[in-house]
Image (tube, rainbow, N blue to C red):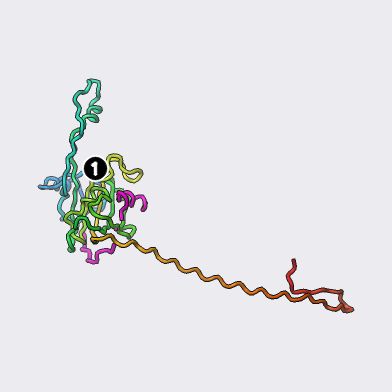
Amino acid sequence: MKNTMTALLLATSLPLVAQTSAPKPAVRHTSTTAATATHHAAEPGCLKLPEISSKIPALAAGLPCAKPLYTLSRTPDVKLDYASPLLSPEAREAIATGPTTYSLGYIDTLEGAGPIAKPGYYYTVHYTGYLQDGTKFDSSVDRGEPITFPYGQHRVIQGWDTGFEGMHVGGKRRLFVPYQLAYGEAGRAPVIPAKAMLIFDVEFISQSETAPAPKTPPASAPKPASPAPAAKPATAPITTSQPSASSPTSTTSNTPKQ
């Protein structure tokens, strides 16, 4: 799973380091109810989100609603000029696609105290990703190993390549990434379904103007030296004992028997 999701998040590679040392404030969780979502959706500037599973960790009480970081509209290249009466409403709808609008949503769950995110820098980030049904599909937190990637250089999904705007180092954010800014209509089987919205909890750990040095693999323990072979003793000459009256004639030797 680790290798699969690393390849997923990075368009080519998803590289990311030390946890922030700032103490984490106590967080009081509250469940997200339909009433809460409706209330937030009615607030000015709030983003209307599809329903997400209660398996996804609830955010702290008192946080603002999800807001769009930006909104895009896409108009199809073709339009339906004529449709036979034989076409079913479902077929008409499939053919006559209209403009689509989607937004990258976010909620800042912790304001960072460090420098603001700079474009083109290498960001080191911890993350946990969920599907809309609550399935956790990947987590650098669980692995204990953050990832590093060059921001804005198309090395990650578009929702990540633009989703850290306005954050400060040490900050945390929940991102709501529509499928158009993630893995598209096809998804990425078997982990990411088709047209899957993704929810990410991210922590902005650090940023650097240059790429971090690759990790040096731990040196393997040196193998113990093999002991030198013992010197082969010289073969003693064959000795012949004189027969005695009480024993048969015998020939003795210290050479091994064949």
Is 249 above or below relative to 83?
Answer: below
Query: Which residue is drawn at the image coordinates 18% and 61% (left, top)?
Result: 112
Q: Which residues are magenta?
A: 1-29
Q: Is residue 221 magenta?
A: no
Q: Position of residue 249 (x, y in %)?
A: 86, 74
Quadrant, the C terminus: bottom right
Give the vertical position of 71 relative to 257 (above or below): above
**Which residue lies most toward the top here?**
85
Q: Secondary structure at mark 1?
A: helix
Using the rendered image of the protein, determine whether residue 172 is visible from the camera's viewpoint: yes
Q: Is residue 252 left or right of residue 183?
A: right
- Quarter where residue 118 is shown: bottom left
Classify 82 as above or below 225. Answer: above
Front residue of 210/178: it is 210
Q: Is residue 190 left or right of residue 78?
A: right
The image quarter in which residue 21 lies: bottom left
Residue at 28% x, 47% y: name it.
131
Which residue, given by chain and number where applicable, does mark 1 sit on?
A: 180
Residue at the limit of the structure toward the left, as seen here = 44
Q: Which of 240 and 142 lies nearest the eye of the viewer?
A: 240
Q: State the residue at coordinates (26%, 59%).
A: 124
Whether residue 65 sits left or right of residue 160 in the image: it is left
